[in-house]
Structure formats: structure tokens, C-alpha cells
Amino acid sequence: MKQINSILIANRGEIATRVIRTCRKMGIKSIAVFSEADRNSPFVEQADIAVFIGESTPAQSYLDQDKIVATAKKTGADAIHPGYGFLSENVHFAKRLEKEGIIFIGPNADAIAAMGSKSRAKTLMINHKVPVVPGYQGPDQSIARLTKEAVKMGFPVLLKATAGGGGKGMRIVHKKSEIEKAIAAAQRESKSAFGDDELIVEKYIASGRHIEFQIFGDKHGNAIHILERECTIQRRYQKVIEESPSPVMSEKLRAEMGAAAVNAAKALNYDNAGTVEFIYEEKTGDFYFLEVNTRLQVEHPVTEEVTGLDLVQLQIESAQGLPLALTQETVKGNGYAIEARLYAEDAGNDFLPVTGTIQKFEYPAVDGLRMETAIRSGSEISIFYDPMIAKIIVHDDTRLAAHRKMQYVLRNLVCQGITTNQDFLLQILSHPDFQKGAYDTHFIATKMDLNALNTKEDLANNISGIAATLHDWNQRNQARSILRSIPSGWRNNFNDAQFEEYQIGEETAIKTSYRYFPSKKHFEFYIAETTHIVQLIEADDQTVRVEIDGMQYHFNIAKKDNTYFVQNESIGNNTLIQKERFPTKAAEKIAGGYISPMPSQIIKVLVKEGQAVKSGDSLIVISSMKMENTIEASADGIVEEIYANEGANVEAGFLLLKLKSEEA
């Protein structure tokens, strides 16, 4: 056994913070590495040592094995913890560390190699009597062969990258005419994310639940499971909410699935933390093996909360060669835990990721709340990494109690300055089917009204407008240096009220006309046909407390240029764009122009100038926050000019290319 006294964390963000916390608990020196984009991130400050390793793109920093190994040697690290993503399931990295004499905190390289390819993993599971989803996994990766196999098994089918996870390199294909484009996109995305473009084709199970079992092994042949996590609520094949125990789990089913998970672990001689993922068909009671993630999972805190275990500590102890201190009989669940992932994304706009500065990040002190994040007020959300801001975990005695607490946290959490999925998470938690545990992997697509996220009730819009107006009024009033004895907003025509106009979403506009009455120390607001009596109780740069028609409200407010982010416990989050007082020249809309919908990196330009294209043809592939999107032609035409260069980083609204009609 080799004792670990120092650990280099080959990762970033909240998982780096998580590993640092256990290192500190165990008296182990933590060594962080960071890219240019992460130079001022909290995990860099929290580590005992922090070393700059390169530019912001992962290939130049967190995926650069040479830099990471060199840093480990320079700092005298005994071991490297890879976290999840990046190099965590890279067998070449694990083997290299073994040769370098550096302990890899993860399973042995042979287990990673066996599970690093989903196709080889399926073959191994078949040989060990673990049920698998019907499909094709083989060396012939030609479009013709993959298409033939898809047609043979019947649509819909699922294309899935054999390397990596997180939904990257995955496509559902519903008909033959879509298969060629889907194969190319999945291969390209997989190659970009994992350096490997091999795919498998599986029969797509239209209605199922995603249930995974935490497994753990040691170097002495012991292997156990540490209960299950329900991970069915997903968007873009990525998990949004996880809970344990699963709402559909019986003791009989847990025993059967748990035994299959342990069997898979033993087949691999598994010796660290891992997860066996299954798809479960509730109608038939059948379950099928999906994959083994040979690393710590993003949602591991759910298991920690229901068992009281520190999985990172178990990882470190196992990597040192210590035998598991647990047996299957001693693993017990206590209560219920749920995790919600807070993302920087616009759920009401197809979950497009967003970037920017988080001006204010605060959350309430709630018993049983665990917040895993590497974000604070002032943090930047960049295009280079996953858009997850935080993992919000709540533990309580029952599912009902934990759900109630989670809703309270989400209503009172303040994350302002960018668009997040906070209101969307609340919408899920309040849905009757979710509360009953009656959901499948299509829950978001079939049960959620995403359009409602962009629509607030009139009262919510009105009081948001009042809050924004008074915030602005207070800022102006505080800044006055002359004629302070004159009431703010004084008019020589008393009937001429002050006003502000706001745009809320694409369709809603409000005008807040108002007058201040110094003798009464209150305002009158006139919105549409309604008059509101408003008293400003207190205000500062980030908050406003007001009384509106006898009801007191506390608002958190962040302002960026002419955009207000208004948050309140009862109305959630609202974004208001303050209109200019005087007409401004409208931004020119380029005829036939295609713009980037978000800050992105140009992955591939698929057309050339002068090329004729049809409506629906792919034009440009862009990537933001590790997720690809394809810009498609909205009409027939000819490519007139291309402004985007492959590899370039562009801002939202950047003109990518222009098409002209064939008649022009």
C-alpha cells in the first residue's frame, strides 16, 4: 500500500471544489490546475496549490496530458483525481500514470478499456448474462453499414458514441431519410468531445426510466452496490433531476438490478467508484444494461446523502490499496435525497446555453440543503465548458418533505445577471405527475409547457415593472447633487407623469407611468387601466422592498446595460428590457443572413460560396458549452458570402453567412 499525501485534481469547477473538501478532511494536500478562463474561479483559491496549465479551450488545458503529468511531477503529487468528464475515462491517461508511478484515483486501466467502448461493454455484459438493449456494435463504422443495421432493427433507433457520455454523440433517428445526417453529426460531436467517433446503433426504447446503481470495488476482489439513483428526468440526453430511492423501486427489483450491477463490476475486476446504468420498462418490468461509467458521477451527492458515505474518500482509500470497509449487508439507505442541476441556459428557447456574468449568487440557509458549486457573485460563465452552475441537493426523511424543501430553495435562490433554468426546475417539481413519480425519459418533452416559462401573469409583470422603475428612480435620486430640495420627477405640469417602458419577452410590453407624492410619501403607478398605491420602503444597488396596494414585496434586482433581472419568491425570475426614451436606429437585418444564436465556437463550415442549398440543408456547425448545434437553411438559395472561420469564437448575433435566392 502506498499512502497518498497529495492529490492533483485534473478537473475544474464544482467537482474540483468537491475533491478539495475531502482532501482537507483527510489531511491531504490538494493541487488544482486551471485554465485562463478559470484563473479567478473559487476552486483555484480553495486548493493548497494552484498551477496555470494553458488556454481556455479544454484541448489546451484540462485535456492536455503532457501538461497535467508535468505539473504532477513538478508539484510532487502522489495521485491524480480526474473528477468526471475530461480525462476521467481515458484509458491511455490511466496507463500513462501507472508508468509514471502516479496513482490514478479511479478503476484499473483494464476496466476502463473494457467499458470505454460501449460496444465492447455490451459484448462483455452479454457474455456475463446481463440483459442488454438489442442493437449493433461492431468494427464496420461505415455509413452504409450503420444505416443497414438501423433499417434492419426498425426505426426509431438511437445512435450513441461508444466513448464518453453526457449525451454527446447521441441522436434519435425516426426515419431512414434522417440517418445519414444524424450519423455524421453524432460522429463529429463524439470525435470533438472524446477523440473517438465510433458509434453503436440500438433499438430506441420509447418509454423507459433511467435507473443507475452506484458500484464500488477494491483491489482485493470485493465489489458491492451502494443503492440506486433515479435519473429519468433529462433534456438533450443530459440529466436535470436525480433522486434516491427511485419512486418505482421495490425490494425485489432492487435486489435483481443490484445483483446485475455487482455482477458487471465483478466481471471487470472493478476496484473503485463506478455506475452501472439501466433502462427500465415500467410496463413490462424488464430492465436492460446501458453502460458502466468508470468514474465518479455528477449526481454522486444523492447517494452520499442517503447513505452518509463520502464516496471521494472511499475512492482515495481504494486507490491506496485499502480493502472496502463496507459489505453489501451494511449498506443502508436513510431517508430521501433529490438533486436539481442549475444550468446557464434558456429552457424556453430549446435549452440554448447562455454566457455572461453572474452578478449575484445567494441561496437560503435550509436544514438538509447541500449546494455543490464553484460559482459566486461576479463569476463568468464562458463558452468553453459545461453550462452547469450548481448542483442543489436536499435530504429529508421523506420524498414529500425533500420536494417541499427543494421548491423552497428554488423559489428563494438568487442567481442573477444571466438566464438560468431555475423557473423550469420549479415547474418540474410542481408537476403532479412528477410528484407522484409517474414519469419516463420523455417527461420534459411531453409534460412540460416550455412556452409558459416566457409568459408571466399580468400582475407579475406589473410588479416587476414597478420594482425595476423604483430601483432606477432610487439610483437617480441618490446620485442627485443639485436642486435636491425639488421633489424627484418634478414637472411644471403636475398631470404629466413620469414613465418607463419595458419589453418582457417577444410579445409583452408594459408602460409604468407614475407620480411621487412627497406629502404622502408614496407613489401612484398607472399601468394599463389600473392604479397602484406604492410605498418604497428601502432600496440599494441589488434589492428593493416595496409595498404595493398593501402587500409588501422583496425583490432582488441586477441590471446589465438596459436589461433588468428581477427575482422575487412569488413571481420567480423576470427579465425586463428598458426601452430607450428616444428613437434609436434599428439594427439592420441582413437579408438572407444567418447569425449565431449564442456565443459559440465554429466547428465546421459545411458549404462553400456559390453553392446551391435547399431548405433544411446544414450550413454551419457551432458549439457552445460542449454541445453542438447545426445552423440549417430556412429557404432554398445560393451561398453568397461566408464570414465564419472554423475554430473561431464568435459572439451571439455574429453574422455567419448570407444566402441569396436562386432568382436573384
Image (cartoon, rainbow, N blue to C red):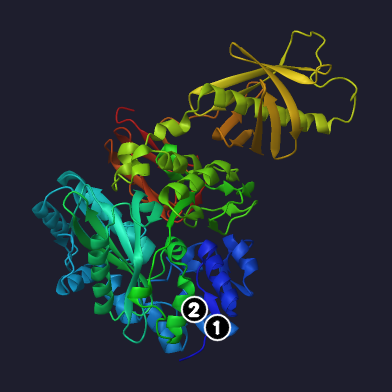
The reply to whether the C-beta atoms of the residues labelled 2 and 1 are less than 8 Å apart is yes
**Mark number for residue 77?**
1
| Quarter of the figure with the C terminus | top left
Position above or below: 534 against 299: above
In x, y percent, where is residue 621?
A: 37, 49
Residue type at tag 2 = Ile
**Mark number for residue 340?**
none
| Quarter of the figure with the N terminus | bottom left
In x, y percent, where is residue 487?
A: 84, 20
Q: Which residue is rendered at x = 48% and y = 27% of the image? A: 506
In x, y percent, where is residue 404?
A: 48, 44
Mark 2 to mark 1 CA distance (whole Å): 7 Å
**Mark number for residue 80?**
2
**Looking at the image, can residue 472 be seen?**
yes
When asked about the image quadrant of residue 318, the answer is bottom left
When asked about the image quadrant of residue 494, the answer is top right
**Looking at the image, can residue 579 be seen?**
no
Position above or below: 268 against 569: below
Q: Which residue is rendered at x = 42% and y = 54% of the image? A: 646
* SS assignment at label 2: strand
Q: Is residue 251 left or right of residue 486?
A: left
Q: Which residue is rendered at x = 31% and y = 85% of the image? A: 221
Position above or below: 142 against 404: below
